[in-house]
Image (cartoon, coloured by chain):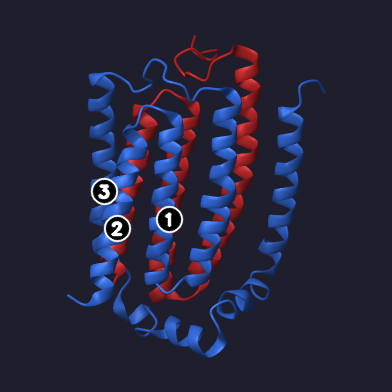
Amino acid sequence: MLLGPALFVSAVLFALGVAGVLLRRNAIVIFMCVELMLNAVNLTFVALAQTLGIAGQIIVFFVMAVAAAEAAVGLAILLAIFRHRGTLDLQNIHLLKG
Amino acid sequence: MPAPLVLFWVFAGLAVASALMCVTRRSPVASALWLVVTLFQTAALFVLLDAQFIAVLQVLVYAGAIMVLFLFVIMLLNIGRAGPSDIKGPIGLAVATLLAGAVGLQLVVLLHAAPAGALGLPAGAVETAEQTQGMVAVVAWPLFGAYLVPFEVTSLLLLAAIVGAVVLAKRQL
């Protein structure tokens, strides 16, 4: 019954996450928007688990584990970048930009 | 409209509104706190979708652990104070709106590709399983049965993340 609305809401949340990644310059905020997208995908999995079996909820469990690992390593990288360059503004981090 | 649907739209509206605030607030701390609100609303949506255990995990792991880590790093780097705005100008806004709108439109179109009714479980099957087996057991049995190997690999992943985070964040190796 709630499948259609849940998929719609997760599409909106995912699009908001994409907008955040494109709109912001601060690396930490971009990272948070990526978490928002992961969360939207989790909502899709849980909604589909209602009709397609409990495996969807188990995949959400794994997504959370990956998100935790990603947050730990990603924030450590951001810390290292900040220590190295003194900023997290992606406009100023352009080592690969010809 | 049945009560769960009303509740669903209330929580969904709050989730979308706070996600919007998260994307548009200038201060990273405000963004992080609005993201916490979104995560809580999503946990409520999980409860409405018969995933109580996942909802608890969402609050404990996501809103609890991961967002505290984010806030901790924001405060550690002292970027929370009001500086120049990190939101891009009108061109960036237009590009972001356009591309995000395109992605959202594609995902909404995908709604019509929802699985055929014959493929799915009968309505309320997960709910009945939760009532007969318990809401943790219904997740735990497949997790420690069919998905045992991925579960064990997850522990390796977390170990690698711990080691990687320590190595990366250390001042001198």
Amino acid tagged 2: Ala
For label 3, the residue is: B106
Q: Nearer the viewer, residue B42 or A58?
A: B42
For label 1, the residue is: B40
Colour-to-chain, blue: B
Which label sits on residue B12?
Answer: 2
Chain hosting mark 3: B
Query: For numbered disc 1, what is the local secondary structure?
Result: helix
Q: Residue B94's image quarter?
A: top left
Identity of the residue drawn at 68% across and 63% down: B151
Residue B145 lies, with reference to residue B87, above or below; the image says below
User: In the figure, is residue B127 to the left or right of A7?
Assistant: right
Identity of the residue drawn at 60% across and 42% down: A70
Rendered location of residue A66, percent (x, y):
60, 50
Q: Earlier in the sequence, mark 1 or mark 3?
A: 1
Nearer mark to the viewer, of 3 and 2: 2
Residue farthest to the left, as pictured: B1
Which quadrant holds the N terminus of chain A? bottom left
Chain hosting mark 2: B
Q: Earlier in the sequence, mark 2 or mark 1?
A: 2
Query: For numbered disc 3, what is the local secondary structure?
Result: helix
Amino acid tagged 1: Phe
User: In the figure, is residue B43 to the left or right of A88?
Assistant: left
3 and 2 marks in contact (CB < 8 Å): no
User: In the figure, is residue B7 to the left or right of B127?
Assistant: left
